[in-house]
Image: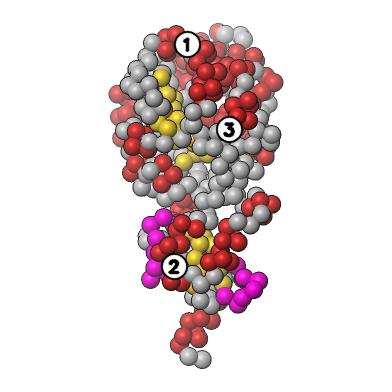
Amino acid sequence: MTGRQTSKAARRSQIGASYLETDLSTKSSTGIITVETWPTSKDYGVRERGFVGVRSTVELLSTPAGGNNMSSVKDRIRLEKEPLNPEIALVAEIELRETPERIKEATVALRELIRANKNLHYRDDDEFLIRFLRPTKFYPESALALMIRAAEFKVKNASVVKDLMPKDEYKTLVENNVVNVIVDRDQLGRRILQVNVGDKRCFVSLQLSLLAPYKSYCKYRSSVASLVLSDSSQRTSDSQHLEVWDPSKVTANQIFRALYLIHVAACLEPETQVRGVIVIMDFNGLSYRHVKAFTPSFSLLLLSFIQDAMPLRLKEVHMVNQPFIFNAVFQLFKPFIREKLKARVSLMDCRWRECIYFTMYFHGKNMESLHKYMNPDHLPEDYGGKKPKIDYTSKDWYPLLEELEDTIRGDG
């Protein structure tokens, strides 16, 4: 057997496994390659998250400069429950008045207030109480008021959130791609929640445009195209080929329930408690059928939770890729935004490019506008950033939520 034959045999043994070569690379591609045999040929097609390439026989190509990033991304899909490091502790002291002495004083005071209130049924251990003390800057009375509002919200909206468990929204989280948590925090260490509201499909692992650097190797481009355009029944079996939002399958209330479950997980992260949360709402593909799904009752539900009952520091909400029809959606929400919040309005540009309302920023397709608030070094390519394209979904986060059932049940 010649050296080249030996090399090919070795490559064949890698079929179906993660395999990397470094003679070609692309900055856009990330991930584990999956090798598929073409039914009309003995050549092999390589499909990976980020690009599709075909090379003669079984000389397989993978990707990225910097190695296999997909495994590292998957490893980072986790809850970050570590205690505050010195840097974050300093942020907590400056922004939240948090010191060891104040933690002790405030938890003791809040515990006494809870025990004196016969209508509240919460845990009263330090870890739980701190979740409410951090967003209220360690004022016990304010933390108690937040706990009361949170309890009242659950009672008032029992039909939506009572006894809610991750398994109740399995289809929303696993079979759709409406909500997602970006693995990279922003430049200030804030968690980034992505909400996809539109008809676009998530073909992040199959992009013909990325074939250009490999043109000379792609003798079977028609076969590649047929793979990309395979029917939707095949696509939905892959976690990366999910419809973003079909209102006939996922109601607006189900989106809220999914967001509620994600907020429960975020509340368990000390760093997120301190640094807060950013939301990117992506309206790419928004249509009239989506607008119809946003009812006034849903608008009231969402804004009541954000303004009254959410024990997280929501710092900013960024609207991107919104079409003209988005104005109809926003008109549903405006009546429920409190006057004291409306007082914070700063209209910089009444077109959609850079209009600020409350903590909401409207960017349209102008990613440079988004980058004024979110450093592109910490954003994925999807939003003009330098991080790899998003090639994971809420399906990848779901196992973590599933592990929280006992915690959710114990929080009451």
Number of residues whose C-alpha sits closer than 10 Å to that of mark 2, classed few (under 14), some (14–19) or many (20 or more)? few
What residue do we see at 55% from left, 47% from top? 202
From the image, tell me which residue sits under label 1: 338
What residue do we see at 30% from left, 24% from top? 94
* CA distance for labels 3 and 2: 36 Å
Label 3 SS: loop
* CA distance for labels 2 and 1: 56 Å
- Image-based side of 102 in relation to 80, left or right: left
* CA distance for labels 1 and 3: 28 Å
Circles 3 and 2, Cβ within 8 Å, touching? The answer is no
What residue do we see at 56% from left, 66% from top? 222
Residue furthest bottom in the image: 1
Label 2 SS: helix
Magenta span of residues: 18-43
Q: Which mark is residue 222?
A: none
| Image coordinates for residue 257, horizontal then vertical, percent | 62, 29
Number of residues whose C-alpha sits closer than 10 Å to that of mark 3, classed few (under 14), some (14–19) or many (20 or more)? some
The earlier-in-sequence mark between 1 and 3 is 3
Three-letter residue code for mark 3: Ser
From the image, tell me which residue sits under label 3: 287
Above or below residue 151? Residue 222 is: below
The earlier-in-sequence mark between 3 and 2 is 2
From the image, tell me which residue sits under label 2: 215
Quadrant where the C terminus sits is top right
Pick whichever, 249 or 134, lies toward us: 249
Prevailing secondary structure class for the magenta stretch in the rendered image: loop
Above or below residue 38? Residue 141 is: above
The earlier-in-sequence mark between 2 and 1 is 2
